[in-house]
Amino acid sequence: MSVLAWTAREAALAPQGLVSTGAATPRLLAALARREPAELARLSAVATRSLLIVLGANELLPWIDGVRYCAPEPAAPQLWLPTHLAPGLPMDLLQSNLVARAGRSPVLLWNEPELLLPLDQAMALTPALLDWLSRECC
């Protein structure tokens, strides 16, 4: 993927997910582990070796120093982006291209590190999944 030009949004999108990397991830996992299983089940997660994405309603997302927030683009709802940034391309065309490239949707387009990640296989958070993520993720 080539480097995109990103611009600051006039008004940030309301978060519907968060992206955690590095030192913020253990703090995030600890905060999630303090939640009741029923509350956890209302959140879902996608992970790679270097980052953890937690999806859910804004009021359910933990607020942790060092994580950044994401949301679907209103003009292209299958395209998730940082809440405070927008790529400098037409959203509908970008969404079409990236969904075709990924072969599924929705997709997260992230600026740093630059990546495209399908979100369709997000798993409901459970205490067992949190334990696994604490050992294996990020």
Image (tube, rainbow, N blue to C red):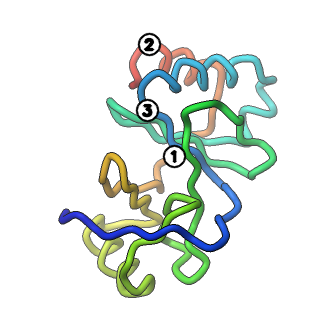
User: Which disc is residue 135 wearing?
Assistant: 2
Spatial separation of the CA atoms under disc 1 and disc 3:
17 Å
| Dot placed on the residue nearer the N-terminal end, 1 or 3 | 3
**Amino acid type of the residue tagged 1 in the rendering:** Ala
Q: Is residue 41 left or right of residue 115?
A: right
**Amino acid type of the residue tagged 2 in the rendering:** Arg
User: Which quadrant of the figure contains the N terminus?
Assistant: bottom left
User: Which disc is residue 122 wearing?
Assistant: 1
Q: Nearer the viewer, residue 27 or 44?
A: 27
| Dot placed on the residue nearer the N-terminal end, 2 or 3 | 3
Residue 76 appears at what percent x and percent y?
52, 79
In this picture, is 125 found above or below 113?
A: above
Q: Nearer the viewer, residue 110 or 107?
A: 110
In this picture, is 69 found above or below 67?
A: below
Q: Residue at x 67, y 70 (%)?
A: 11
**Amino acid type of the residue tagged 3 in the rendering:** Thr
Q: Residue at x 47, y 70 (%)?
A: 86
How many neighbours does mark 1 have within 10 angstroms: few (below 14), some (14-19), or many (20 or more)? some
Residue 7 appears at what percent x and percent y?
44, 70
Q: Residue at x 40, y 78 (%)?
A: 95
Spatial separation of the CA atoms under disc 2 and disc 3:
15 Å
Q: Is residue 36 left or right of residue 121?
A: right
Residue 104 appears at what percent x and percent y?
37, 66
How many neighbours does mark 3 have within 10 angstroms: few (below 14), some (14-19), or many (20 or more)? many
Residue holding disc 3 = 21
